[in-house]
Amino acid sequence: MYIVNIHEAKTQLSRLLEAVESGEEVVIARAGRPIARLSQYREPQRKISPPGGMAGEIWMADDFDEPLDELFGCLGTPG
């Protein structure tokens, strides 16, 4: 790991990116306190499914939207 201050990061960005390309990790610090990390870009490991990608995989019962009154019978109506 390579730590640089903000001023050095601004003036030496090309050199820092070369270090990152060669596998180094660069930490940018302000007053000695780390605030950012430069590291190699990695493609996301998980791809997002396209719209409709789950077609035929999901089903709902025909009565999924029927009233559930029997579950709430104990509530009743006041009065």
Image (cartoon, rainbow, N blue to C red):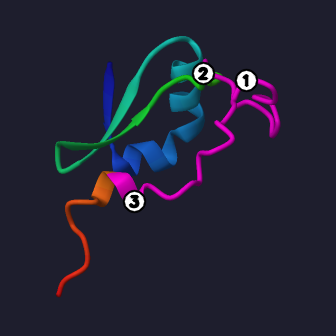
The residue at which mark 3 appears reads as: 69
- Residue 55 or residue 34, whichever sits in front: 55
Provide the secondary structure element on which disc 2 rests: loop
What's under tag 1, amino acid-wise?
A: Glu
The chief SS type of the magenta part is loop
What's under tag 3, amino acid-wise?
A: Asp
Provide the secondary structure element on which disc 3 rests: helix
User: Is residue 12 positioned above or below 75 on the image?
Assistant: above
What's under tag 2, amino acid-wise?
A: Arg
Going from N to C along the chain, the mark reached first, 2 or 3, is: 2
Q: Quadrant of the C terminus?
A: bottom left
Q: CA distance from mark 2 to mark 3?
A: 52 Å
Residue positioned most to the bottom: 79
The residue at which mark 2 appears reads as: 42
Q: Is residue 51 magenta?
A: yes
Is label 2 in contact with label 3 (beta carbons under 8 Å)? no
Q: Which residues are magenta?
A: 45-70
Give the label on residue 57, or none. Answer: 1
* Residue density around tag 3, few if under 14, some if 14–19, many if 20 or more, within 10 Å: few
The percent coordinates of residue 18 (x first, y second) are 59, 23
Provide the secondary structure element on which disc 1 rests: loop
The percent coordinates of residue 1 (x first, y second) are 32, 18
Q: Residue at x 20, y 60 (%)?
A: 74
Q: CA distance from mark 3 to mark 1?
A: 30 Å
The percent coordinates of residue 55 (x first, y second) are 81, 30
Going from N to C along the chain, the mark reached first, 1 or 2, is: 2
